[in-house]
Image: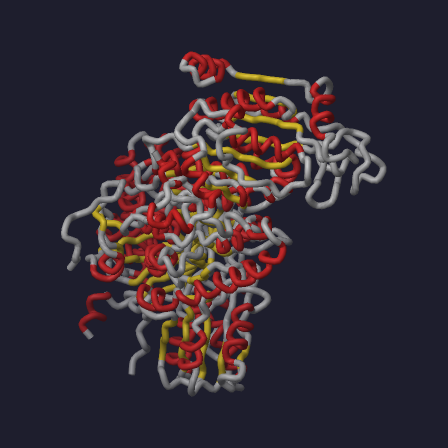
Amino acid sequence: MSYKIFKINEDLKEFMPPEVIDLEEKATWGNPKRGVMDLPYAKELIEEHSLCAGCPESAAFRYILASLPNPEDTIIVNSTGCTSLVFPHIALHTVHSLFGNQNAVASGIKRVLEWRFPDKVKDVVVLAGDGATVDIGLDMTLQSFFRQEKITTICFDNEVYANTGGQESGMTVKGHVFKMAPKGKQWDKVPMWQIAIDSGCHYVVRMTVSSPKKVEKVIKQAIYVAREVGPTYIHLYTPCILEIGLNSDDGLEEMRRTDKERFKFFEYMTDEAKEVIQRKKEEGLL
Amino acid sequence: MSQPKRRRINVRMPAIGGQGAVTAAHIMATAADHAGYYAVSNPFFGAEKRMAPAESYVRIGIDPIYDRGEVVYPDVIMVFHSQVITMGKSYTMPFYSGIKKNGLIIINTEEDLLTDRDHEYLESLNVKVFNFPATKFAMEIAGTELATNMAMLGAFFGATQIVGMDSIEEGIKARFLKKFVASGGTMSLDSAIERKFKKKLELIEKNINTAKAAYEVAQEWARDQGMEVWLPKPQEVAKV
Amino acid sequence: MQKTEHVQYNRAGQRVVSPDYLLFEAPREKQFMTGSEVVKEAVKRASVDASVSYPITPQSEAAHLIGELWVEGYVGVYFRGESEFGVMSEIAGCAMAGARSITTTSGPGTLRAMENFPMWAGSRLPIQLVLMARGVNSPLSIQPDNLEMSFLLDTGCMIWHAENAQELFDMILAGFVVAEQPDVHVPLITAIDGFFISHTREAVMLPPDDIALPPYNPYKSPMVPLDMEMAPGRFLRDPYVMKSNYISYAAHTSWQFEVRAAIERSRPYAKHYLRGLIEEFGDPEAEIVFVASGTAAAQAKEATLMLLHEEGVKARVVRLKTIRPFPTQELIEALRGAKYVFVPEFNVIGWLEREVRRALYGNLDVPVIGSPRVAGGMTMPPEFIVKEILQFLGKEVKHVV
């Protein structure tokens, strides 16, 4: 089991910072049943977050990392944007290379790991914002779906380019005024979840991160399906409280509100995906 | 002191896309390589299209060859199609521009296509012109005009006498037996030829026969012209 | 003789031999093939793990042939990407995951992919890019021209420039060895002038194909491979900019210097495996010197012979095999005694002339003439070079018909 890479040499232990010792002793490794319920007790794989106070994206990160069924063999690929601020704080192998190429990099990593480790399961998960996934990187996002890459793509949709100061994105809702759309956005929000289905994803979900348990289930299902069948896509609403003028404690309320409208829970799965999910349920892993 | 003997032949092959001038160039170079010469071949660098101008080049010599790309100053020009001359389907105008003194032009034609001015200019450079009906020849011997390039190839070696039929056979076999990639277009043409001939070996045999017959005709023509062998044998050079 | 005690095989079943044995000692046989085919032959003997391809003339054939090697089991991972930008990102992913990786591109593809090259270098990925240079738009050109090499000079990648198919073969093999040295570990761009090499058929000497380079060991990388088999490394793949703006610029600056320093550290390895960073050709006493690389050097060699045999003019060629690192000291030494330095080039701006001037400035006082120079797909016949030289020297030009 490769989580042994977190084991610290006994002789050096006294020099190690406590958060690193905690990673060895208190993080949940080698347990596919780990989940968000561990959050209050176990050492999290994210040390801290470098996002705005109260940012729902930070909650999404914590839930996702707590839900990974196989963190000891999971590689995370990210892209430029608010999300990229967080990766240095994650205790797994993560990579930021360029803006928008995350699914291309992930494709290369996944294929090589399959070739190098034919007897091991190595999950590759892409975590990127809506600009990276749907605007600048749409080509590479979709092409990885077309090629049936066995990766899970998770899009944090905050409906804006937040990290660069609040510009309109393809995921902005029509009419909303942001920078670079001073008259309001002239066209509709891109139905990325539908495009993902049409492009060959085997498991697609659109949701907010208002319910941690629900996020856990979806993440696990997406990873299990990607491992065996093909690409999976999770579209998460993580509102930018800053850019839409909310307070730090308003994020959850905003998500609960949109749960009832444009981010109403939506789930799609192919028959092959259904079979995997059913089997994993029977195995007690879901 | 006698005229310094040639140490290099630079060949330019203006043709029409689809005639197999690239293949002819590669076989020519392979044959020369087999005979012990230094040899390099390449196509014209650009877009190739059916029936549009196409050109390829071969350099053969007894010294290492560094020169690459288009042959701007050829010793030999092989015109694969009359349209090179009659319709100006050539990258150079006139098609013989740059021809060197004492050079040779082989034209795939049954009749003389050159004007009096052309003849006058070429004679002033002591350039010989060999009108050789390669396509007609290919039809007669191989039963297909697709073997035109083999006839031209045979004519070149017959006229210049630098390699024998054994090396030409070797070049043809290397081309058709080994997996070969010149371009996607060449590959599809290959399969067209293959369908036509059904069997690869039959194709090789017909190609060799065509080249051989052309070789003999050209050899006789060269003898009539009093032409000498164009390059010293590599073995002779090695002895010196 | 090899010093290995027991025989090792790579995943393709080829016997693993030392780079020195493969490059210098193994018996070689003559083959007659194009530059594209030679890429296949080199990759076949290089224990390559991954390659990603995309069609663009003139590199497509080489990329097809690497695909054949994948079918035959010599390459582990191979697929066609969606664009050069995608391909260079995909091959980056392959290298990050610990694969010996190679890809190919040309002209507009190089520019489409551009953002990736500094990323490769900064990520210390020893990817080998076989660059078959061609014209860059606009107007549309699908002919030889190496302007794109100029754009790549400062990407943090090593750049080598092969003269012919033989050197391309040897450089691809040597390239992996040099690029993967733990104290180098940066990408290598193995450039050729497209068409002039890729589409030209010539004799090459090849070692047997049942022997191959030792496989890549990703755990010797100065960066942790992304496979979760080692504790996560925290550097560029984990940028400081995300932690502290203050640490960020210090880290970024030193990292950029470090990438360039890594290229400098490749010198002794390149010198060994390429048998020197430069090649000198012609009369060592000649005062007329061509400084060139790639096909321009080949044309200059031919012109040098022509000048000597037909005009009685002595000249010589100093051919640069590496452009990054630039062989500054070797060049200065080689140019002592030169009266005129001509830099023939296949591009409109004369990037090599600039490089040569920069290297010589303050070191050697000799006129540098950026000529002859052709672009956009033009051939540079040796007759043309001879004419330029004769005209420069004020001599009569007579040999060209």
Point out the residue furthest to the right here.
A183
Q: Nearer the viewer, residue A93 or B124?
A: A93
Q: Nearer the viewer, residue A130 or C351?
A: A130
Provide residue A5's location: percent of width, then percent of height. 37, 41
Q: Is residue B153 visible?
A: no
Query: How many numbered discs sit on the rendered protein?
Result: 0
Q: Nearer the viewer, residue B231 or C190?
A: C190
Figure quadrant of the N terminus of chain A: top left
Q: Residue at x 58, y 26 (%)?
A: A234
Is residue A23 depicted above or below B215 in this figure?
above
Q: Residue at x 42, y 84 (%)?
A: C313
Q: Nearer the viewer, residue B113 or A277?
A: A277
The colour scheme is secondary structure
Q: Residue at x 46, y 25 (%)?
A: A34
Point out the residue furthest to the front here.
A14
Q: Residue at x 48, y 59 (%)?
A: C157
Provide residue A134's location: percent of width, then percent of height. 64, 34
Q: Which image quadrant for residue A120?
A: top left
Is residue A60 depicted above or below B160 in this figure?
above
Provide residue A140's location: percent of width, then percent of height. 56, 37
Is residue C204 depicted above or below B147 in this figure?
below
Q: Is residue A188 visible?
A: yes
Provide residue C272's location: percent of width, then percent of height. 31, 67
Q: Which image quadrant for residue B230?
A: bottom left
Q: Which image quadrant for residue A130?
A: top right
